[in-house]
Amino acid sequence: MIIGFIGFDGTGKSTVTKKLKSIIEENINKDVEIVHGFNHLFLDFITKRLQNTKAAKQHSSGSGKKSILSYIWPFCIFIDSFLLYFYYKIKYRNKILILDRYFYDYIPSYEYLQVDKTGLLKLLFSLIPKADYTFSLTVEPQKAFNRKTEIGDIGDADLEYFIKQKQRYIKLSQRLNIPIIDTGKNNANDTVLAIYEQLSI
């Protein structure tokens, strides 16, 4: 079983996934694993053998002069992500995998970086099947901004960034019919318990 969470920075994905893992392990006898971030199936192996790794990953910074590889890299990520989904389905068929970020998180990220000007990447990543359970976490932008500031993980983002990202994620979740959970309305334990009650495990 795969449980996937999407959401912009500061929505509480890491907190929710850790607490959900604990509550599942307390109630059922199954192995539960959390995988964080944007992982790859083959691309890490490939990039280690590329001389111009910086160009291969330049799309993630959204700055600098881009090489041809930088333009095709997001499409390589799509192919890799599509295959990774099926790899997860096979590997965790008798276990529970919780993904702290799902493949759909690439869509607002590429929109923010202005990588997907044609909308083609949005379409492609939307074709990746949903997890067995997919949830979209949201929160007020100011609260997300405060959370990231408190732990020193704000980078060069400002409040406007969080406002725009929330809008992107709401539109994405509505379009893909993914349940939206506001992590700012209740405490973390109540939020996770509400999620757990939606799982048929």
Image (spheres, rainbow, N blue to C red):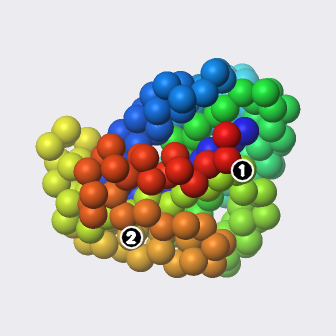
Image coords of residue 163 (percent x, y): 30, 72
In the rendered view, would you say 26 is above or below 140? Answer: above
Residue 56 vs residue 40, the one in the foreground: 40
Q: Tell me the amino acid under the disc marked 2.
A: Lys
In the rendered view, would you say 112 is above or below 84? Answer: below
Residue 132, label in figure: 1
Image coords of residue 82 (percent x, y): 79, 48
Image coords of residue 134 (percent x, y): 61, 55
Image coords of residue 90 (percent x, y): 85, 32
Q: Residue at x 40, y 68 (%)?
A: 165
Q: Residue at x 33, y 57 (%)?
A: 183
Residue bearing mark 2:
166
Which numbered mark, 2 or 1, is in the foreground of this view? 1
Q: Residue at x 26, y 68 (%)?
A: 140
Question: What is the total number of numbered labels drawn onto the structure image?
Answer: 2
Q: Tell me the amino acid under the disc marked 1.
A: Asp
User: In screen coordinates, is 138 left or right of 80?
Assistant: left
Q: In this view of the protein, can residue 69 be seen by the observer?
A: no
Q: In this view of the protein, can residue 20 be seen by the observer?
A: yes
In the rendered view, would you say 55 is above or below 63? Answer: above
